[in-house]
Amino acid sequence: MRTTLIQICIFASCLFFCSCDPVYNVDYIIDNQTDQNIRITKKYITETEKATSSISTQTRLIFHTDWGIGNTTKKYLENLNALPFDSLIILNHLGKPLDKDAFDVSNWTKIIPEKDGDIGSITLSVRKEDFK
């Protein structure tokens, strides 16, 4: 009886630890490499209100964190082909819009973590030359 109870505990432990779903955690970052402040306005697909942030010169802002169950961070970033925003407007200090396409994922730099469970990131670097 005791052996059976031990086997059940071992089986239950193995089932518990082996059946966990993978998780992902990704920071979306704007890196202001200009010599002036910039302003970003974003609207998420699931929200009706927009949020505006100002980013100081030579500063990085994490403006969104995406997380969930069912994917590793590595797979999430490798398969990312669209951003989770309805709109993303980036203006320089004079109100001029960003000239490069902020929705083109190829304009973003992905940092894929080495270990599962670590936080990854995707960064859009904004330079003075990127404005009209």
Image (cartoon, rainbow, N blue to C red):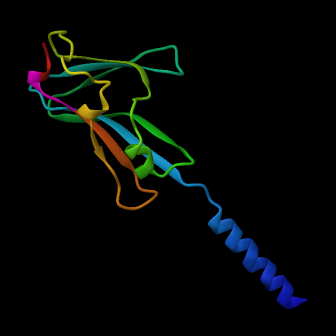
x%, y% of residue 25? 45, 46
Image check: 45 left or right of 42? right
x%, y% of residue 52? 35, 18
Front in this rendered view, residue 80 or 26:
80
Q: Residue at x 32, y 24 (%)?
A: 103
x%, y% of residue 8? 81, 78
Instruction: Tell me, yes or no, whether the highlighted magenta stretch contains residue 12.
Output: no
Q: Residue at x 86, y 89 (%)?
A: 2
Vertical comparison of 126 with 95: above or below: below
Vertical comparison of 73 with 84: above or below: below
Image check: 70 left or right of 51? right
x%, y% of residue 77? 39, 44
Q: How many marks?
A: 0
Q: Quadrant of residue 92?
A: top left
Tell which residue pokes out farthest to the right in this image. Answer: 1
User: Looking at the figure, which quarter contains the C terminus?
Assistant: top left
Is any part of residue 30 visible from this angle? no
Span of residues in magenta: 125-129
Image check: 62 left or right of 3? left
Q: Quadrant of residue 40?
A: top left
User: Looking at the figure, which quarter contains the N terminus?
Assistant: bottom right
Q: Residue at x 44, y 59 (%)?
A: 116
Image check: 18 left or right of 123? right
Is any part of residue 79 visible from this angle? yes
Q: Residue at x 40, y 51 (%)?
A: 119
Q: Quadrant of residue 42?
A: top left
